[in-house]
């Protein structure tokens, strides 16, 4: 009988503490609404160049509480999950999985969207750090190259060829 009473007290106490936790205010999910919209490249701004990496003239960005989608020049969307889960790119025509993976992180107040593409003995890692302020979107881009199968970063022959700043203006 005493044991049953102790169990009942524990159940009531646990339910009460659980209920108290439920009373905390629920915070709205972060959706990065400042990034949303269509953006046009400002070719007079920005600096640097990374050979072999295309620069989109237009970006269309949409966001939800769980992902960010970036459409570059009308191509199929690149989808980045905010929980950090990698997303495999798919061929728009066949639906086949491609050798490109997309990742998300927050770095120094910027949204860092990373793509990794493996070709032969190397994996190109392109990190685009997005920061929006009003009608201006700045992307700090960096290229890193991973050697396979050792899985170590390599030093590029021209270190100036691994960083680039891109500036976009919001389409009105």
Image: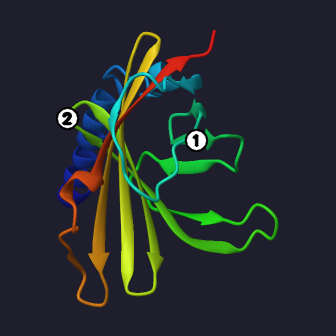
Secondary structure, mark 1, is strand
Please state if 169 lies on the left or on the right of 113 as rendered.
right
| Residue with the most extreme bottom position | 149
Would you identify the image quadrant in which residue 22 lies? top left
Q: Which residue is mark 1?
A: 69
Would you identify the image quadrant in which residue 45 lies? top left
Work out whether 142 lies above or below 66: below
Pointer 2 or 1: first along the chain = 1
Q: CA distance from mark 2 to mark 1?
A: 21 Å
Is disc 2 in contact with disc 1, using a CB cutoff of under 8 Å?
Answer: no
Q: Nearer the viewer, residue 121 or 8?
A: 121
Question: What is the x, y in percent for residue 5?
Answer: 23, 50
Q: Residue at x 30, y 69 (%)?
A: 145
Q: Nearer the viewer, residue 144 or 43?
A: 43
Q: Residue at x 63, y 9 (%)?
A: 172
Q: Which residue is mark 2?
A: 108
For the N terminus, the quadrant is: bottom left
């Amino acid at each position: 009988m005493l044991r049953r009473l102790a169990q009942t007290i524990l159940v009531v106490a646990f339910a009460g503490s659980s209920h108290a936790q439920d009373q905390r205010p629920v915070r709205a999910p972060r959706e990065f609404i400042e990034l949303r919209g269509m953006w046009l490249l400002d070719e007079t701004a920005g600096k640097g160049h990374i050979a072999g990496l295309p620069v989109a003239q237009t970006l269309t960005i949409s966001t939800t509480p769980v992902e960010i989608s970036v459409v570059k020049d009308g191509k199929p969307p690149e989808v980045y999950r905010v929980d950090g889960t990698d997303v495999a790119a798919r061929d728009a025509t066949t639906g086949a999985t491609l050798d490109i993976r997309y990742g998300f992180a927050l770095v120094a107040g910027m949204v860092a969207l990373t793509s990794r593409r493996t070709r032969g003995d190397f994996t190109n890692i392109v990190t685009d750090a997005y920061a929006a302020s009003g009608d201006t979107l700045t992307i700090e881009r960096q290229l890193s190259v991973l050697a396979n199968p050792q899985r170590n970063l390599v030093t590029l022959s021209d270190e100036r060829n691994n960083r680039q700043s891109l500036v976009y203006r919001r389409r009105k």
